[in-house]
Amino acid sequence: MALSPSPSHLLLSKPLFLSYRTSSGNPFVPKHRLACCYHNFDDHREVQSGHLLHYDKQVQRRFLLLISVSTSLSPTLPSLGKTKNKNPYDEMRLLEQNKRIQKENNAPEDFPNFVRKGFEVKVVTSENYVKRDSGLICWDFEVGKGDCPKAGQQVTFHYIGYNESGRRIDSTYLQGSPARIRMGTNALVPGFEEGIRDMRPGGKRRIIIPPELGPPVGPSTFFSSRQFEVFDVELLSVQDCVRRTIGFYSDLVCN
């Protein structure tokens, strides 16, 4: 017959803490602790030891059951620091969207496509285009004859400017007169000057200028965003320039 221990006969032993972690290995899952207290009686030690052994087995079974249940119910947290993979379907969708917009803007034949996703831009061109180390992309429709322009010389040329959507933003043909500028005076956009520096009179070229070689961007400029610019250029002539001084007046004469 089991004995009912009296509080006066009860001695509380030192608690035993049992800890475990779930099998998921996640450091953010908290540890669980189980405290067991063993009772020690002054009288009937032999009888009571049997009850203590039975009590210990019950605690062990409950402890193992608690581990299995908590492990199965513990949520699996998403892994941290995953890099976002590029979705090829999104890239194809953006490419088709750019092609559709360029078609609506009547972009010229074999116009480059631009896949813009956030701050990243991918330029899609045919094999006719050549990319330089500077990032400039060119395609020669026609190769002219004669010498290439040098610093200090004046170049006369026609051009048509487009944005990434294939929309025309400027044209000297519509203005009715070609543009004239001296090379090496920082009067041109860096990418534009690089693009016509090795052209010959009579040549026609398409130039794709990256933002790094493009015009300055800001509220005080015409351009409000860093985008690729496309120019179809026709170099008409190259002239030497001579400074002419008459009294207090001085100018350049280019023939």
Image: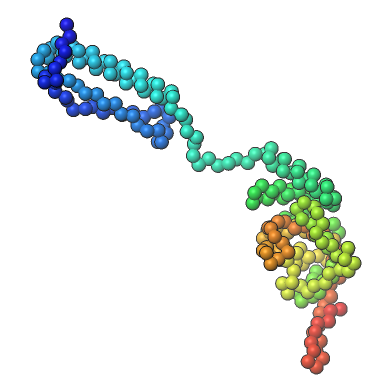
Relative height, residue 232 to residue 21 (above, below)? below
Q: Which quarter of the rendered picture does the C terminus lie within?
A: bottom right
Side (left or right) of 9 relative to 133: left
Q: Quadrant of residue 21?
A: top left
Side (left or right) of 237 relative to 57: right
Relative height, residue 66 to residue 240 (above, below)? above
In terms of depth relative to the viewer, which is nearer, 64 or 123?
A: 64
Residue 145 seen from this side: no
Q: Position of residue 45 (x, y in %)?
A: 12, 14
Q: Position of residue 1 (x, y in %)?
A: 17, 6
Furthest residue toward top? 1
Q: Position of residue 109 (x, y in %)?
A: 85, 50
Q: Position of residue 254 (x, y in %)?
A: 84, 79
Relative height, residue 232 to residue 12 (above, below)? below
Tell me the residue at 55%/42% (across/down): 83
In terms of depth relative to the viewer, which is nearer, 138 or 171?
A: 171
Relative height, residue 50 to residue 200 (above, below)? above
Tell me the residue at 84%/67% (across/down): 157
In terms of depth relative to the viewer, which is nearer, 241 or 52?
A: 52
Furthest residue toward bottom? 247
Residue 58 seen from this side: yes
Furthest residue toward front? 7
Furthest residue toward left? 43
Q: Quadrant of residue 142?
A: bottom right
Please name the colour scheme applied to the rendered image.
Answer: rainbow
Tell me the residue at 11%/12% (across/down): 44
Q: Quadrant of residue 54?
A: top left
Tell me the residue at 39%/21% (across/down): 68
